[in-house]
Image (cartoon, rainbow, N blue to C red):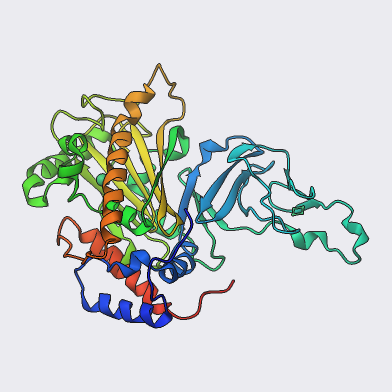
Amino acid sequence: MQSISLSSDDSRQQLSDMLSWQARHTGLGLAAYFYQSNRVYQHELERLIFNSWICAGHVSQIPKAGDYFLFDIDSESIIIARDAQQQVHALLNNCRHRGSRVCTEPSGHRKSLVCPYHGWVYELDGRLKSARQMDMLSQFDQQSFGLKKAQLEIHHGLIFINCDPSAPSLASDVAAIQTPLAAHELDNCKVAAVRNYSVDANWKLAVENYLECYHCATAHRSYAKMHTIKDLEVNVAEEQAKLEARCEARTGVPGIAQLHYKVYCHSNHPGGGTECSRYALYPGFVTGSKDGQALAPLLGKLKDYDGGLADFQFGPLSFLIVYPDHGVLYRFVPRGQNLTDMTLWWLVRGEAEEGKDYELGKLTWLWEKTTQEDKTIITHNSEGVNSRFYQPGPYHPEFEYACLDFVAWYLNQMQTTAGEPHVQ
Ligand code: FES
Ligand SMILES: [Fe+2]
């Protein structure tokens, strides 16, 4: 869908006025303007999206030298490729001749990357290998026409990219949650399934929806039956205390219930940050399955099910839920002002075999269902906030605390950067 401005007044002054209005109304949802203005959207791309760490996928998607897949953000395309030395690169998919997309298939295997327009050939690390007959151009410096790169870091098998060359590393943020994250040995996992759900809504509506479970009891009946996070802390304190008392002994992982919250306003840098927590499933459920029973072999170092699951966040847009026997990686990226990709990866032990160790339909059942339900409610939310009659109401102080943090972070970033667009 094209980015279109729905707002009749889309001036810089309007942006500045609306940021001031929103800052004076702490505790309220964002005004319609922030979902409708194309100026706002362009600003967000420059200052919140293309300078954030975003999960591109998992290393098992490109196991061999020459494997690649594309990762699209807004109208941009990034090639995630593995070279002959097993190094993984994030290459901007714009030919250095006249700008054509170099890779046009969403994934594949190539010895080198050949631009389909005039045939320039690139190595898998982005270096320009040959440029047909360009030797006729005096002083053509082949070395200076490699594909541009985004920053890329791999942590626990998860591939993260950042399009801002000056963005600080995500490494120290990930190191802060090392204990619970490493226990699952995600680098030895494989992707059992990956699915993309496009939703006709602004990216902030999709992220805000993920950040709160106020809606879980009403929109996700199956999910709410098994996850205590759907209720207020005081109502599930007993289940949580029991989990915390048993989880280390059951899983065999000291520190598995580490609590860490340094995202959004609490992050050391705005495009990074991590979060982790462990919370209880209701009695009768050992994992996120329809019947409460195990779905796949236990992950990593875990010795047994403890009736809990891990919740992680990386940067502003990437999330990970890890049950003892599988993980669900969840990422949101804008594809237009009113179009968002919600992408999910299901992770299981690397050696697990479909049909023998797990059944794919059972594995994906819960989060396919939950995501379809989310898609529906986010679409309705989008229709509502684009109505002429919409007025933002108050967030719930406990259920929607992460939305409050998200909005505060958002306003900070937009406020400090309300001037001219960033030029690279
Ligand atoms: S645009 Fe790629 S070779 Fe010309
Ligand atoms: Fe939801």
Residue 104: image quadrant is top right
Residue 284: image quadrant is top left
Residue 230 versus residue 12 in the image, above or below: above
In this picture, residue 143 sits left or right of residue 126: right
Residue 267 versus residue 330 in the image, above or below: below
Residue 63 position within the rendered picture, expressed as x and y whole percent measured from the top left: 58, 35
Residue 258 position within the rendered picture, expressed as x and y whole percent measured from the top left: 26, 50
Residue 36 versus residue 102 in the image, above or below: below
Q: Which residue is rendered at x = 48% and y = 44% of the image?
A: 57
* On-image quarter of the C terminus: bottom right
Residue 143 versus residue 132 in the image, above or below: below
Q: Residue furthest top?
A: 356
Residue 296 shows in the view:
no
Q: Which residue is rendered at x = 33% and y = 61% of the image?
A: 263
Residue 83 position within the rendered picture, expressed as x and y whole percent measured from the top left: 67, 43
In this picture, residue 219 sits left or right of residue 132: left
In this picture, residue 91 sits left or right of residue 275: right
In this picture, residue 216 sits left or right of residue 141: left
Residue 40 position within the rendered picture, expressed as x and y whole percent measured from the top left: 41, 70
Q: Which residue is rendered at x = 86% and y = 63% of the image?
A: 140
Q: Which residue is rendered at x = 63% and y = 42% of the image?
A: 86
Closer to the camera, 349 or 24?
24
Closer to the camera, 131 or 86?
131
Residue 385 shows in the view:
yes
Closer to the camera, 407 or 172?
407
